């Protein structure tokens, strides 16, 4: 085989590989778009119903010992953002958010304290997850002025969110759940072809506190 024919063979092999990669990328994009649209349509419909029902919220506590009052979920909102991918407009993410407030009466003022690192880190992580309005106060000995503990003065309200991010390259959707089961952030990803109404039903059950197979 002449050198020219060798180059021709290599060029054809590369073109075939590029065509295959392009076809795979386009298929992944199409599948991911279908899944993201399914999630967006489902959450848009779900939010309308939950806004009327105001389901019970999860049992919450910053330190694991001081319970919040019975909570409910209100003011559901859904949003979606798009981006450009290979000159095509595609989903970037879909999100739903809501407020977690007391079932009865107004938002309350409360406080918890911690004097050891594990307890302090637990409280701070839960405050961050729930975007809980608070102030951190140093508690000092009245005579020695030594630091005894940190007190967190907070309000019994939080924010729940679900953010679904599209990965068109991997044909998957990443779910970030904040304060659905507790004051925590949980992330999980699913292949795009698994994001159907049956999976979204499991997510809805999780939000309202029913038995759900959405998370392991």
Image (cartoon, helix red, strand yellow):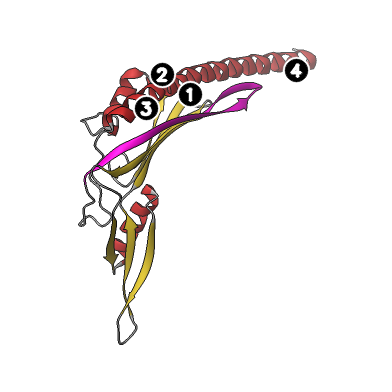
Q: Is residue 51 above or below residue 146?
A: above
- Label 1: which residue? 171
Tag 1 near tag 2, CB within 8 Å: yes
Magenta-highlighted residues:
70-92
Q: Is residue 20 left or right of residue 191?
A: right
Q: Are marks 4 and 3 in contact (CB under 8 Å)?
A: no
Q: Which residue is mark 3?
A: 47
Give the vertical position of 155 relative to 88 (above or below).
Answer: below
Circle nearer the viewer, 1 or 4: 1
- Point out residue 15 in the picture as x, y percentages from the top left corner: 68, 15
10 Å neighbourhood of mark 3: few (<14), some, or many (≥20)?
many
How far is disc 3 from disc 2 in space, using C-alphas?
23 Å
Relative horizontal placement of residue 42, taking residue 29 as reference (left or right): left
Residue 199 — which label? Answer: none
Q: Residue placed at 20% from the left, 57% from the top?
A: 65
Report, in whole angstroms, how far the alpha carbon at label 4 lies from the one at label 2. 40 Å
3D distance between C-alphas at marks 1 and 4: 34 Å
Per the model, the C-alpha gap separating discs 1 and 2 is 8 Å
Determine whether, in the image, residue 29 is placed left or right of residue 184.
right
Q: Which residue is mark 4?
A: 7
CA separation in Å, label 4 and label 3: 59 Å
> Which one is earlier in the sequence, the residue at label 1 or at label 2?
1
Measuring 36% from the left and 72% from the top, which residue is drawn there? 138
């Amino acid at each position: 085989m002449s050198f020219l024919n060798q180059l021709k063979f290599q060029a054809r092999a590369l073109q075939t590989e590029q065509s295959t990669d392009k076809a795979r990328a386009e298929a992944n994009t199409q599948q991911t778009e279908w899944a993201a649209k399914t999630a967006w349509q489902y959450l848009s419909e779900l939010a309308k119903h939950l806004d009327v029902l105001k389901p019970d919220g999860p049992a919450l506590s910053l330190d694991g010992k001081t319970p919040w009052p019975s909570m409910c979920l209100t003011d559901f909102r859904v949003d979606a953002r798009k981006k450009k991918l290979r000159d095509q407009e595609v989903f970037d993410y879909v999100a739903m958010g809501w407020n977690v407030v007391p079932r009865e009466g107004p938002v309350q003022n409360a406080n918890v304290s911690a004097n050891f690192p594990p307890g302090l880190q637990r409280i701070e992580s839960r405050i961050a997850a729930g975007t809980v309005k608070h102030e951190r106060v140093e508690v000092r000995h009245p005579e020695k002025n030594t630091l005894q503990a940190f007190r967190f003065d907070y309000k019994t309200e939080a924010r729940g969110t679900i953010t679904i991010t599209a990965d068109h390259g991997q044909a998957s959707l990443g779910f970030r759940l904040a304060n659905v089961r507790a004051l925590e952030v949980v992330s999980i990803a699913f292949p795009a072809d698994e994001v159907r109404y049956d999976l979204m039903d499991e997510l809805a059950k999780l939000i309202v506190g029913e038995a759900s197979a959405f998370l392991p």
